[in-house]
Image: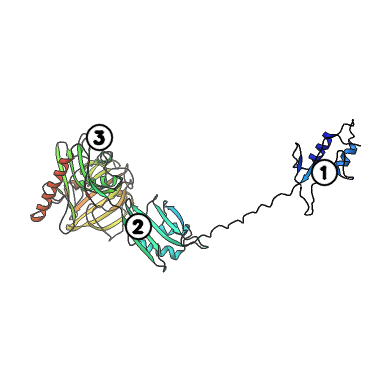
Amino acid sequence: MRLRPATAIFALLALSPAVQIGPTITALPEVPANAETPMTTQPGATAAGSPASELAAADPPPSEAPAPDVIVAAIPAPDIPVPEATPPAAADPETDPQERILVVGRGDTLAGLLDGAGVDNADAHAAIASLSRHFRPAALRPGDEIAIRLSTGGAPALQEIEIEPEPGRTVRASRQSDGSWRDEQTIAPRTRFLVRAEGTLDGGLFPAMTRSGVPAGMALSLIRILGHQVDFQRDLQPGDSFAILFDRFRDSDGDILGHGQVLQATLTLSGRTLEVWRHKDRQGGTDWYDEQGRSLRRSFLRTPLDGARISSGFGLRSHPVLGFNRMHQGIDFAAPSGTPVYAAADGTIVSAKREGGYGLMIRIRHAGGVETRYAHLSRFGRAITASRRVRQGDVIGAVGSTGLSTGPHLHYEVGVGGRTVNPARHVQQATRLAGVELNAFRARQRSLDRIVAGLGTRDEVALASD
């Protein structure tokens, strides 16, 4: 029985997956090693017992028409060499370090951050000791970044640690080949600028200063300096103005690296002009003076806290809690709870405890038989205990409302020889520069005046590289 041509072709397609249909049909099955010349099969011939013969027996053709020639060829696939895979290069602990950035969070310490990064305690201690020659680790603040490099062996070892404590200053400690540590500090080239900031008061000196571009810390420092001369409750009025000269440092790209010090400030208070000048003497000491060379520093601050208003003065008054008239032995400064309270002068802590209607109170003994008292505090400052020495401006506590009080405020008293006096009038006469120091002070004034005159409408001028 003959196989239909179409049936024969499709039978071969089913049996051989790689068949080319055309003048010849070429199959690419695997060929035995002893395969001979391709075999030609005559029309209608099939091998007995083959799948093709079984398919032909099951599907007889309806006619006797001759089938076309079909050539089946077995061609071996060429041998293609496969390249061997190259194993990846092994990491070298000395040449391929792992770099990480550690970000300081609230309450973090440098030792704790290194421990969390898997650094060995001995390595961490040695690196921190090396860094400490240029940087105090306790000065880290939330948000600061610490760059470390670790070896990439089985147990990573600290190779280098780098910190930028302030813009333009980098501190680095690196492990040497002998295991010791080498520290270095790099200061980026910077240029010093003189900056002029001006403004008008419309609610408070501190916010007015910061709006004009004075850094917050610098503004607070200047307010404390002015506290020797200015009563911030009575002397400042809306419309008063100020002008401040201070240092600013920029890198070679013009980016701000930081700020230096206030050099001079002028305040116009209800028509009265007050000028203050920073002066460094021949011994290296720095202090503040008015335009005549008189020291601003007094034995006692007029206001022992920032941004407060006087809510009750010294003298006879009706007590707001007890409801009857009696002598008010001090001055009350109304301020938000928690506002820092400063020591009004150098002295020694006599006591820091709760005292009846005064609530939490601190007593400080000063030279000349003078004692200052700070009452109604919400808390005492760190390590404020009896017999401790304090300096003028040290934080000793915080404003509160303990004891007989209707709201948060500081009650401030001054006693001389056991008798209370009006704190507003207890001030020391100013000392004045003389001789060589006064001449140096005058020369500095003239130099700054010339620079300011050259500013024109600008608010910043380069002075010198640093």
Please name the amino acid that badge 2 sits on: Val
Near mark 3 (Cα within 10 A), the count class, few <14, some 14-19 or many ≥20, is some
Residue at 60 percent of width and 56 percent of height: 85
Q: Which residue is mark 2?
A: 171
Residue 99: x, y in percent?
45, 55
Label ID, residue 202: 3
- How many marks overall? 3
Looking at the image, which is closer to me, 379 or 270?
270
Residue at 25 percent of width and 35 percent of height: 202
CA gap between label 1 and label 3 equals 110 Å
Which color mode does the image show?
A: rainbow
Q: Which residue is mark 1?
A: 40
CA gap between label 1 and label 2 equals 87 Å
Q: Secondary structure at mark 1?
A: loop
Near mark 2 (Cα within 10 A), the count class, few <14, some 14-19 or many ≥20, is many
Please name the amino acid that badge 1 sits on: Thr
From the viewer's perspective, is the residue at label 3 or at label 2 nearer?
2
- Residue 180 in which image quadrant: bottom left
Residue at 68 percent of width and 52 percent of height: 79
Please name the amino acid that badge 3 sits on: Asp
Residue 102: x, y in percent?
43, 53
Residue 318: x, y in percent?
25, 40
Furthest toward the left, the residue is 435
Furthest toward the bottom, the residue is 178
Q: Quadrant of the N terminus?
A: top right
Q: Earlier in the sequence, mark 3 or mark 2?
A: 2
Looking at the image, which is closer to me, 361 or 10?
10
Marks 3 and 1: in contact by CB < 8 Å? Answer: no
CA gap between label 3 and label 2 equals 43 Å
Q: Earlier in the sequence, mark 1 or mark 3?
A: 1
